Amino acid sequence: MDKLVVHGGSPLDGPLTVGGSKNTALPLMAATLLAEGTSRITNVPDLRDVRTFSNVIRVAGPAVTFDAGTHTLTLDAATVNHPVAPYELVKKMRASFYMLGALMGRCGEAKVSLPGGCAWGPRPVDLHIKGMEAFGAEIELEEGYVQASAPGGRLDGGSFRLEPSSVGATINLLLGAVRARGGSRIENAAREPDVVRFGEALRDMGAQIDGLGTDTIEIQGVDRLEPTSFRNTPDRIELGTYMLMAATAAEPGRPVEIREGTHEHLGQDFKDCFAETGVDVEYTPETVTVTRPEHLRPVSIETAPYPGFPTDLQAQWTVLLALADGTATVTDTIYDDRFKHVPELQRLGIDISVEGNTATVEGGNPIKGAQVMSTDLRAGVSLVMAGMIADGTTHVLRVYHLDRGYEDLEGKLRRAGIDIHREEYEEFEEPARETVS
Ligand code: EPU
């Protein structure tokens, strides 16, 4: 297995460049199944999750090729003749469940494995299933699989309210509804930029969708969608992660430039909280420049659906609070139990306690290098961040979690001034099964 070895204390100089979004690329890939023919997606990151989802799609029949050099994915969905997403692949990545909507939209039938557990507690898919039923699907659960079919081979369409709002369920319901016989309505729909870009891509393919970016999306089903080429958006969570790294690991007073991100996609809450810490931040359409202050102010955050503070940035925020002058809290209202990074950060000396869905961080304790284990993608990157500001050497084990969502993290950080490299190591304990993202 691989680990990242970080020698703390070398300042982050920058520049850093943001790649394509993982959480937008996956639904864009699912969308291409709806059109008979070859679609192309550019700016696709070279990540393990993209390769896993390519394999999930191949099982259904399409040919998928990825050119990592140009970050271009080509999907030939002329044939979709095996509408199945098997457990062996779905258990590796929850987003494989997008096959439910994609296959219902394309074939009017689907057999998709339930994703099972997640590294940080229950993450149900009940809304995906109930919503699909509301749109006319007949669904049975058999031997861990969702067996869905649309009478007459096509969904009717219908109305469904998501409670709570869900990114994944909004995407699945859109995939099903765009080729339904009639109209559909999704209430309390997700407004995340990932969903908006995905909906725009469906529109480019010929879908009729109104209300993207609002909490009510209306769809009028069409008979046919056409294959097309589209560009994936930059990864907003990668951008936010680099902003937090600049705020903690750069030399105070020395600006770090981050390129090719779209700052509007961060949501206003994150930007407001970030500015409140005392960092100087300048936004242009192509760059974000962050200057670390001498002292960071402790700012409490609470995660919420977009445009609220993203849950995918709360672990990284926790590390920023470890450097702040005082005490602040991190509350996750999306996931009650997303604190697997906390015991690992404690091993580095950070003073944190967790009660319910709130972590309290007392800033200012010395941070010292140690061996730590990444348990999921965002937890893993928070450990790398902490290693960058620790005294001594930090070994972040199980880097495969990071490879799911950050392309060439160590290469990008090394070129930006951080003393970090990857090493192989032997692990005696079998890793517990995890399904995240
Ligand atoms: N929920 C239900 N029932 C459902 C679906 C969701 O109760 O059927 C609940 C969830 O338990 C959660 C809330 O609704 O409390 C929101 O979950 P959502 O469905 O929006 O999450 P997701 O679609 O499974 C995506 C991202 C996650 C990100 C969340 C929240 C992808 C592939 N994954 O997951 O990203 O944390 O939205 O923004 O887009 C990551 O990238 O590290 C990651 C985990």
Image: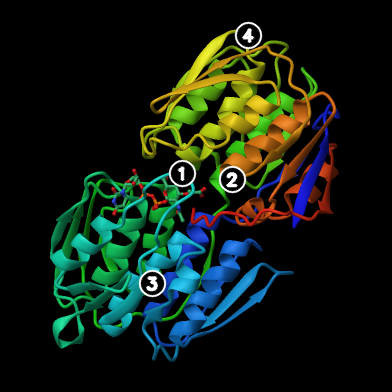
Query: Which label belongs to residue 325?
Result: 4
- Secondary element under disc 4, as helix, strand or loop, is loop
Q: Who comes first in sequence, dot 4 or dot 1?
A: 1
Q: Could you say where residue 374 lies in the image, as x and y percent from the top left?
A: 64, 44
Quadrant in which the N terminus appears: bottom right
Query: Which label belongs to residue 99?
Result: 3
Query: What is the C-alpha distance between the residues marked 1 and 2?
Result: 9 Å
Q: Is residue 44 visible?
A: no
Looking at the image, residue 167 sits to the left or right of residue 186; the answer is right
Q: Are marks 1 and 3 in contact (CB under 8 Å)?
A: no
Q: Who comes first in sequence, dot 2 or dot 3?
A: 3
Q: Are marks 4 and 1 in contact (CB under 8 Å)?
A: no
Q: At 14% across and 72% down in the image, what residue appears? A: 136
Query: What is the C-alpha distance between the residues marked 4 and 3?
Result: 47 Å
Q: Give the residue pinned by disc 1.
A: 120
Query: What is the C-alpha distance between the residues marked 4 and 1?
Result: 29 Å
Q: Amino acid at mark 3?
A: Met
Q: Amino acid at mark 4?
A: Asp
Q: Are marks 1 and 2 in contact (CB under 8 Å)?
A: yes
Q: Who comes first in sequence, dot 4 or dot 2?
A: 4
Instruction: Give the quarter of the image for residue 71.
Output: bottom right
In the displayed structure, 144 sits above or below 417; it is: below
Q: Is residue 144 visible?
A: yes
Q: Who comes first in sequence, dot 1 or dot 2?
A: 1
Q: Amino acid at mark 2?
A: Thr
Q: Who comes first in sequence, dot 1 or dot 3?
A: 3
Query: Which label belongs to residue 375?
Result: 2
- 10 Å neighbourhood of mark 3: few (<14), some, or many (≥20)? many
The mark lying in front, picked from 1 and 3, is 1
Query: What is the C-alpha distance between the residues marked 4 and 2?
Result: 28 Å
Q: Are marks 4 and 3 in contact (CB under 8 Å)?
A: no
